[in-house]
Image: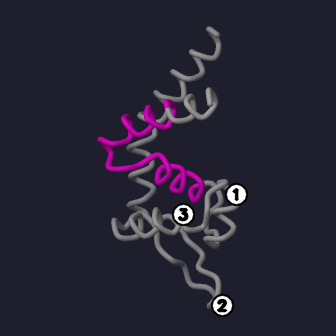
Amino acid sequence: MAARSEARRITRLYEEHLRPHGLRATQFTVLAALAIVGRAPINELATSLGLERTTLTRSSVLLERDGYIRVAHSEDGRRRPLELTRAGRHKLDEAYPAWKEVQDRIDRERAGA
């Protein structure tokens, strides 16, 4: 129970800091992952991020609606590779300092523990 409580506390911190940028923690994570890997099929991305496919699908629909990601062309119609757009890269760069602030805070808390 203590681990779940701590995980929720940390998620709340990220959510609070990313909210002014119009992102949820999961959405930021998707943008960051796509910035690193380029394009990725939704199933592979979900697996690498440790997310349920349905959770990633919900987040990706919103990110696509806002123009931050798009479904890339694929020779295999069964695959839906996602990729970051220019606007998505801009949003990621804009929100990164807020994410980093939380990350640094968590690191300081762990160092003091």
- Spatial distance from mark 3 to mark 1, Cα to Cα? 11 Å
**Disc 2 target residue:** 75
113 sits left or right of 88 in the view? right
- Spatial distance from mark 3 to mark 2, Cα to Cα? 22 Å
Q: Residues within 10 Å of mark 3 (few under 14, many from 20)?
A: many
What colouring style does the render use?
Answer: one colour
Residue 4 picture location, percent across and down: 60, 35
Q: Residues within 10 Å of mark 2 (few under 14, many from 20)?
A: few
Under mark 1, the amino acid is Ser
- Spatial distance from mark 2 to mark 1, Cα to Cα? 22 Å
SS category of the residue bearing label 3: helix
106, 37: nearer the viewer:
106
Q: Pointers 3 and 1 in contact (CB under 8 A)? A: no
Vertical placement of residue 109 versus 85, above or below: above
Quadrant of the drawing holding the C terminus: top right
Instruction: State the residue at coordinates (55%, 30%).
Output: 5
Would you say residue 16 sits in the magenta stretch?
A: yes
Characterize the magenta stretch by its predominant secondary structure.
helix
Instruction: State the residue at coordinates (62%, 85%).
Output: 74
Instruction: State the residue at coordinates (46%, 66%).
Output: 58
Q: Residues within 10 Å of mark 1 (few under 14, many from 20)?
A: few
Instruction: State the residue at coordinates (62%, 91%).
Output: 77
Would you say residue 21 sits in the magenta stretch?
A: yes
Q: Residue furthest left?
A: 20
**Disc 1 target residue:** 48
**Disc 3 target residue:** 56
Magenta highlight range: 9-35
Q: Given this view, does label 2 or label 1 mark the residue nearer the observer? A: 1
Under mark 2, the amino acid is Glu
Residue 79 picture location, percent across and down: 64, 82
51, 85: nearer the viewer:
51
Vertical placement of residue 95 versus 101, above or below: below
